[in-house]
Structure formats: C-alpha cells, structure tokens
Image (cartoon, rainbow, N blue to C red):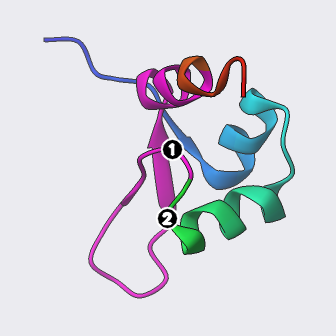
Amino acid sequence: MTQRERLTTAQAAQYLGLSQRQMERMRADGVGPIWFKAGDAINSPCMYEVTDLDVWARQRKGK
C-alpha cells in the first residue's frame, strides 16, 4: 500500500492557487475540498490529501 500525499492548509492553498484564508473560509463554510484533522489535539493541523484536492478542482471546472 502506498501512502497518500498529505498537505497542510498552506500547502493545499498553494497547490490550488488559492490563499490560505480562502481555504480556511471554505472549510468553515463546508464548501471546500475534503479535509481531516491530523490528530486529536485542538491545535492539530487540518490536512488535505492531494487526490481529494484534484477531485475537488475537477468538479469546479466550468463553474
């Protein structure tokens, strides 16, 4: 099994050509790419899998 590449919010924003603030807003509004917390602590980072970012970007084409 290969490990999926995971990115922080800042890395995911750069990957998609968006600002980190846009990513945070979309996450809060529930309209952005699939994300997950990388731990149980309150300060655990939000992470994104590259495959989920690609799917989300493809779905947005033409909008």
Q: Is residue 12 above or below residue 52?
A: below
Give the x, y percent position of residue 32.
56, 51
- Please give the range of residues in magenta: 32-57
Question: Of the residues shown, which amino acid type is indicated by label 2?
Answer: Gly
Give the residue furthest to the bottom. 42
Give the residue furthest to the front. 63
Q: Which residue does the image show at 73% across and 28% down from the upper left?
A: 15
Q: Please give the residue where the numbered disc 2 appears in the rendered image.
A: 30
Q: Quadrant of residue 2?
A: top left
Q: Please give the residue where the numbered disc 1 appears in the rendered image.
A: 33
Question: Of the residues shown, which amino acid type is indicated by label 1?
Answer: Pro
Give the residue furthest to the top. 1
Q: Is residue 39 magenta?
A: yes
Nearer-the-camera pick, 51 or 8 = 51
Q: Is residue 53 above or below residue 44?
A: above
Q: Quadrant of residue 22?
A: bottom right
Query: In the rendered view, does 16 fall on the left or right side of 50?
Result: right
- Characterize the local packing of mark 1: few (<14), some (14-19) or many (20 or more) Cα atoms within 10 angstroms: some
Q: Which residue does the image show at 61% across and 25% down from the upper left?
A: 57
Image quarter in which the N terminus is found: top left
Give the x, y percent position of residue 58.
57, 17
Q: What is the C-alpha distance between the residues marked 2 and 1?
A: 8 Å
Q: Which residue does the image show at 41% across and 88% down from the upper left?
A: 42
